[in-house]
Amino acid sequence: MQTHEHAQQGTPSAPPARPDRLPPGGATIIATLLVSAFVVILNETAMNVAISTLVRDPALAIDERAAQWLTTAFMLTMAVVIPTTGWLMARFSTRTLFVAAMSAFVVGTVVAGIAPTFAILLVGRVVQASGTAVVFPLLMTTVMRLVPPARRGAFMGTISLVMSVAPALGPTVSGAILQFTTWHWVFLGVAPLALAMLLVGARSLKATPVEGAPRLDALSIPLAAFGFGGLVYGLSLIGAEGLPAWQLPLALGVGVVALVAFVLRQARLQRTDDALLDLRTFRHSQFTVAIVIMVLAMASMFGSLIALPLILQQAMGLEPLQVGLITLPGALLTGLLGPFVGRLYDRVGPRPIVIPGAIVVLAALVLFAQLQLESPWWVVLLTQMVLSLGFAFTFPPLFTVSLASLPGHLYGYGSAMVSTVQQVAGAAGTAAFVTVMATQQAVLVERGVDTGAALLEGARFAFLGAAALWLVGVAATFWLRKPADHVADEPEHDEAAAPAH
């Protein structure tokens, strides 16, 4: 079977005539994908502040645990679909995938917006997630294929802006909508914008024939679903109350066993270029180093995001609106710095940026571990902004290094792996923080310590643990280097591909 170097994604893959210019129509394609990614990610986090409103709706007749499934089901669908996006991008053109993904998002959004019952609302969220899971890997792969190497950092910085600002604005926009109208408009309000992007993309993206597409392995799909889905679901159960004792170990056990079987299956299939998720990405050392750092960074970031609101509300007694105002500036700072950091990467490479950024993250984690009940709110705000500043200088170079380290035919699989890592590492970081906080809190409460003070002490342990683990990430940053403009294919791939010619 031939390589996928020529398996077009609906966009030109040949280098542009000038080293610093996008190919004709490239700017429109990337802008369309960027805005679409912003829309779908914005709606992903919109449910976070609507849970209590949904519980109060008599038409739905649900409790908080059932309502939480709107987030859990979304997360699980993402974990199942994302690993398949590498195969999908090798099999279908960018236009076909974009139209399918945005159509699913629009349909899911409308179904959720008009849902008369909770079951239909849940179905709408699952359909939404299936479209959302495709858009971000598609965006990263398209940038790698269209953007000249000298400008990739700047574009990846812009992507990080979307990743940071959209999730931060989601709860804010949702809160404003709920202030004046019903929860239905959290979905119906975004549907026209999503439909507009679907129409623009369908017109601006070109349908190009796809050659040498891999065959679909029927066994890989359920293995990926049970592996990644089981692992993420099991991690999400850690710290949950009122669950049967068997549920957590069963979910994690199924996830680990299926994931091991999935990896072994892909190792066999990639010899003929038929893997659902090609793991030859890890043969490229810079990709592996960037992924290791990214795993630790994502775990620390998501763990902090779950811990901070709990500290502010349950230990320091702040209102949800105050919590949102304290955490919003950091997210905006990360996003706004993204394009600047990306352009800086293009000039100086990753290490002069990522090493200081990683040290700043370490300092912020240690500072969070020093919080006291009497600490003023502005100390939390400043510390959160320091943490966000560190991540702002860490993520854009990591995204660029990871994908730029790969040959062209692995871009789709690399972006799928990066997105999968975000889901699994985020769930792991959340689970780790929740477990440490809850365990330490329970011990201290038994000793007579106030619940709020005990929670804060548990959070301090969690932040110190994250700081200790992040030392590995800091050390790994010294192995980063800027990849060559064009990465040669590995010999093994050429040998495996030869018989098909």
Image (cartoon, rainbow, N blue to C red):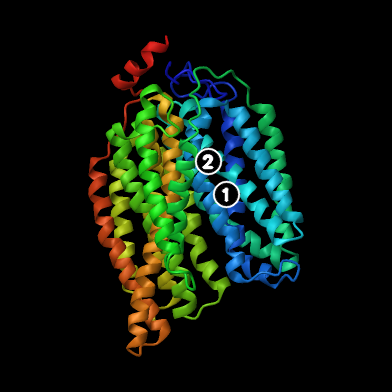
The kind of residue on which mark 2 rests is Phe
The kind of residue on which mark 1 rests is Ile
Tell whether label 2 touches label 1 (CB within 8 Å): yes
Query: Residue, x 53% and y 26% (percent of image)?
Result: 91
Q: Tell how many labels.
A: 2
Q: Nearer the viewer, residue 392 or 494?
A: 494
Answer few, some or many: residues within 10 Å of disc 1's Cα (few below 14, many 20 plus, some between 14 and 19). Answer: many
Is the N terminus in the top left, top right, bottom left or bottom right quadrant? top left
- The tag earlier along the polypeptide, 1 or 2, is 1
Q: Nearer the viewer, residue 417 or 180?
A: 417
Q: Nearer the viewer, residue 215 or 410?
A: 215
Secondary-structure class at tag 2: helix
Mark 1 and mark 2: Cα distance apart in space: 9 Å
Could one spot residue 339 in this view of the protein? no
Q: Is residue 270 above or below residue 186?
A: above
Q: Is residue 37 above or below residue 124?
A: above
Q: Position of residue 79 (x, y in %)?
A: 49, 47
Q: Quadrant of residue 408?
A: top left
Q: Residue furthest bottom?
A: 448
Is the C terminus in the top left, top right, bottom left or bottom right quadrant? top left
Secondary-structure class at tag 1: helix
Answer few, some or many: residues within 10 Å of disc 2's Cα (few below 14, many 20 plus, some between 14 and 19). Answer: many
| Dot label at residue 28 | none
Q: Residue furthest top?
A: 501
Query: Residue, x 45% and y 65% (percent of image)?
Result: 306
Q: Is residue 413 above or below residue 471?
A: above
Query: Residue, x 37% and y 25% (percent of image)?
Result: 407
Q: Which residue is mark 2?
A: 136
Could one spot residue 236 in this view of the protein? yes
| Dot label at residue 41 | 1
Tell me if 55 is positioned left or right of 217 in this view.
right
